[in-house]
Amino acid sequence: MSQALFPGWRPDADGRERLAALAARLQVTQPADGRRLQLRRPDQWHATLCFIGYDARDLVTPALFDAFAAAARHIPAHGFEVERVAYWPQSGAVVALPHASPELQALCDATRDAIRRCGIRPLQVTTQPHVTLAYLERGLPAQSWLEDIACGDEVLCVERFELLFNPGGRYEALAAWPLTGAPLPLAPVQARLL
């Protein structure tokens, strides 16, 4: 059993519909080379915001819940678009990667900071949020057919995050927090000198 513990985002019904269409395009586009594409179930789709660890259920405390609630108050509800689908040979994961999203990365960073404020050292921080749609064998060469997958310009809504626990094969939400922060300040843009 996995026993994984982490804050994560899961798509709402509209987001699951959009990701299901993307997963269907994967199946249609996959070459008939005998490699088995193992799709994940829609109830497994999520973006890990910061990975706390395995066998860490004892770290779930009121202080952790309070830290996540404080983080949620500083990040606005937002959306992101899937930019492309990629294959990661180390894990065999076929992932949906979003366009750069300062809000989504800020949410990852805020959950990381909340975990650390509770004296917990996360096992892995998230620097490239993604949704795993499927798996192929590990260690394959680049999968150029994934470049043909049309991702569209549909927005997936991020309105809340959850503390997720995986007792094996499914994810249980131990708590959830709506995002209620003000819009993030725009990054400064340097004026052209000439």
Image: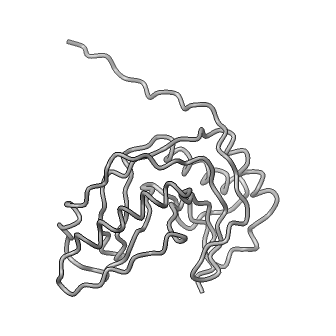
Horizontally, is 37 left or right of 178 in the view? left
Seen from this angle, which residue lies furthest top?
194
Seen from this angle, which residue lies furthest right?
62
Horizontally, is 69 left or right of 190 in the view? right
Identify the residue shown where x is 39% and y is 47%.
154
State the count of labels: 0
- Colour pattern: one colour
* Rendering coords of residue 61 (x, y %): 80, 63
Identify the residue shown where x is 37% and y is 23%.
189
Horizontally, is 36 left or right of 164 in the view? left
Q: Nearer the viewer, residue 96 or 63?
A: 96
Identify the residue shown where x is 25% and y is 71%.
28
* Rendering coords of residue 144 (x, y %): 17, 66
* Rendering coords of residue 97 (x, y %): 37, 56
Q: Quadrant of the N terminus?
A: bottom right
Identify the residue shown where x is 75% and y is 66%.
60
| Quadrant of res 161 | bottom right
Q: Nearer the viewer, residue 151 or 73?
A: 151
Q: Nearer the viewer, residue 64 or 33?
A: 33
Q: Quadrant of the C terminus?
A: top left
